[in-house]
Amino acid sequence: MFLQPKKTKYKKVQKGKLSKFNFRSNKLNFGNIGLKATKSGTISSRQIEAARQAIVRKLDRKGKLWIRVFPATPITAKPTEVRMGKGKGAVSHWSVKISSGTVLFEAYGIPQNVAISAFKTGGAKLPVKTVVLF
């Protein structure tokens, strides 16, 4: 099942701007190795889940994995070939805005070479450039 909020205050929100740098969640808090975004962008809940599955498969379900981001922004879309106007479209998926420097995943209790391989595989599933963080 993909990540999405159980309850929100508003059903639809405006897109807003993407911040370039992040100085709040740029350090490891839980694990000793992590995956960090080097570019800003938006990541959907499907992409987070695909990266998580790829990382877990490489880790052979050993150690502990933390997902540091949560997709709480609804993205709306109108059907194709619909004319302009008539309101905002229905919610199609959930996403999270990522600024460069944000730690996306953290792991603990895994050998370093295995974790590097797993995070590189998981980073390939994401639309932003990533780097493994120690």
Image (cartoon, grey):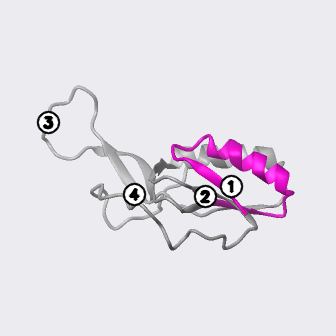
Please state the extent of the stretch shown in magenta in the rendering: 105-134
Dot 1 lies on which element? strand
Residue ID at (84%, 51%): 113
Q: For the residue marked with disc 4, what is the amino acid?
A: Thr
Give the distance between the C-alpha atoms of the residues marked 4 and 3, in whole angstroms. Answer: 23 Å
Q: Which is closer to the viewer, label 4 or label 1? A: 1
Q: For the residue marked with disc 1, what is the amino acid?
A: Val
Residue ID at (70%, 50%): 119
Give the distance between the C-alpha atoms of the residues marked 2 and 3, in whole angstroms. Answer: 39 Å
Q: For the residue marked with disc 2, what is the amino acid?
A: Lys
Give the distance between the C-alpha atoms of the residues marked 2 and 4, in whole angstroms. Answer: 20 Å
Q: In terms of sequence position, does the residue under pointer 2 or pointer 4 come before the other?
A: 2
Q: In terms of sequence position, does the residue under pointer 1 or pointer 2 come before the other?
A: 2
Q: Circles 1 and 2: CB distance less than 8 Å?
A: yes
Q: Position of residue 109 (x, y in %)?
A: 84, 64
- The image's mark for residue 36 is 2
Q: In terms of sequence position, does the residue under pointer 4 or pointer 1 come before the other?
A: 4
Q: Examine the rendering and report whether any part of residue 1 can be seen.
A: no
Q: For the residue marked with disc 3, what is the amino acid?
A: Met
Q: Which residue is mark 1?
A: 132
Q: Which residue is mark 4?
A: 73
Q: Position of residue 7 (x, y in %)?
A: 42, 64
Q: Quadrant of the C terminus?
A: bottom right
Q: Which residue is mark 3?
A: 84
Disc 2 crowd rating (10 Å Cα; few below 14, some 14-19, many 20+) is many
Dot 4 lies on which element? strand
Q: Circles 4 and 1: CB distance less than 8 Å?
A: no
Question: Nearest the camera: 2 or 64?
Answer: 64
Question: Nearest the camera: 16 or 120?
Answer: 120
